[in-house]
Amino acid sequence: GEQETCSGLRTSFLKCVPGTENPASEGVRASSCLVPDACMDDDPCQNGGTCTEERGRVRCLCLPSYGGDFCQSDLERCEPGWQKFQGFCYRHFSLRQSWEVAEQHCRKLGAHLVSITTPEEQDYLNRNFKEYQWTGLNDKTFEGDFCWSDGKPLLYENWYRGQPDSYFLSGEDCVVMVWHDGGRWSDVPCNYHLAYTCKKGTSSCGRPPKVRNAFMFGKVLQRYETNAVVRFHCQDGFQQRLRPLVRCLHGGRWERPQIQCIPGKTRHGFKLYWSKVKTTLQPQNVFLFRGRGLRAAT
């Protein structure tokens, strides 16, 4: 665990074997380094950090809200009553509610029903909240298209074999996890009453900044999690320049918008409209593209 130097390279947490040959200096034998794979042998990274190795050096890539050489420093803490795990805050409720009521309660707290995106997160929930409970996964919008209520992508799945099955036809739109069986998932009717866990980021941003002569896509929310991105679009009669995306940064502040909306022509240089044309085209009809739309040649 102590830092040693092998030919001037910093080798924290690398295994240095006395009397072996230093791969960085041919023919040199002393207290040198033999590193088959330091990350695999003894991963030094904490709090979900990712271990990388390059040229005899180990580096930890930290999750949001952690810092330090080995991601050991907690830079952002959760509110009282919430537990932190790998950059997110969790709060469990044993009072049984329907899926809809549970999700609404989480939203009032600035959170959503828990999304599960890694095996480590699944294990954390199993160990700490030992109840049948709701997850945020559902196919309420489109049958068979399961999505997390917080909008996170479906990167990890832990279904029971044969699930989801929509046993009650279209009635099984919400997903429960069974903690004592590895947290396996099953789709059930949303009117079941179950315990639930809310999840949110450690910090958040308020309403996005205003951009002159531009509007934001989508509904404006009161709270955005860290790393959330909003997109702006220039109003009619203005031309867009620079990046239209703005991100919520750590510490609860928005990055400075780069987009500029310059008075002038539209994106394509002119406005188009489509003239009414007959649905049945005759072979002799030829259509020409003009600056203001499609018109049949005469």
Image (cartoon, helix red, strand yellow):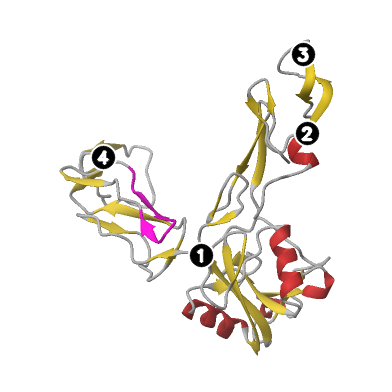
- Could you say whether the residue bearing mark 2 is in a helix, strand or loop? loop
- Inter-mark Cα distance, 1 to 3: 49 Å
Whichever of callouts 2 and 1 sits on the residue coming sooner in the sequence is: 2
Instruction: Residue at 27%, 36% (x, y): give it.
Output: 288
- Inter-mark Cα distance, 2 to 1: 35 Å
251 is within the stretch colored magenta:
yes
Q: Count the marks: how many? A: 4
- In front: mark 1 or mark 3? 3
- In front: mark 4 or mark 2? 2
x, y percent for residue 266:
22, 44
- Inter-mark Cα distance, 4 to 2: 61 Å
- For label 1, the residue is 202
- Could you say whether the residue bearing mark 1 is in a helix, strand or loop? loop
Q: Residues within 10 Å of mark 2 (few under 14, many from 20)?
A: some
Type of amino acid under label 2: Lys
x, y percent for residue 99:
61, 81
Q: Nearer the viewer, residue 123 or 54?
A: 54
Q: Is residue 238 above or below residue 220?
A: above
- For label 2, the residue is 15
Type of amino acid under label 1: Thr
* Mark number displayed over residue 28: 3
Type of amino acid under label 3: Val
Q: Residues within 10 Å of mark 4 (few under 14, many from 20)?
A: few
Whichever of callouts 3 and 4 sits on the residue coming sooner in the sequence is: 3
Whichever of callouts 4 and 2 sits on the residue coming sooner in the sequence is: 2
31 is within the stretch colored magenta:
no
Whichever of callouts 1 and 3 sits on the residue coming sooner in the sequence is: 3
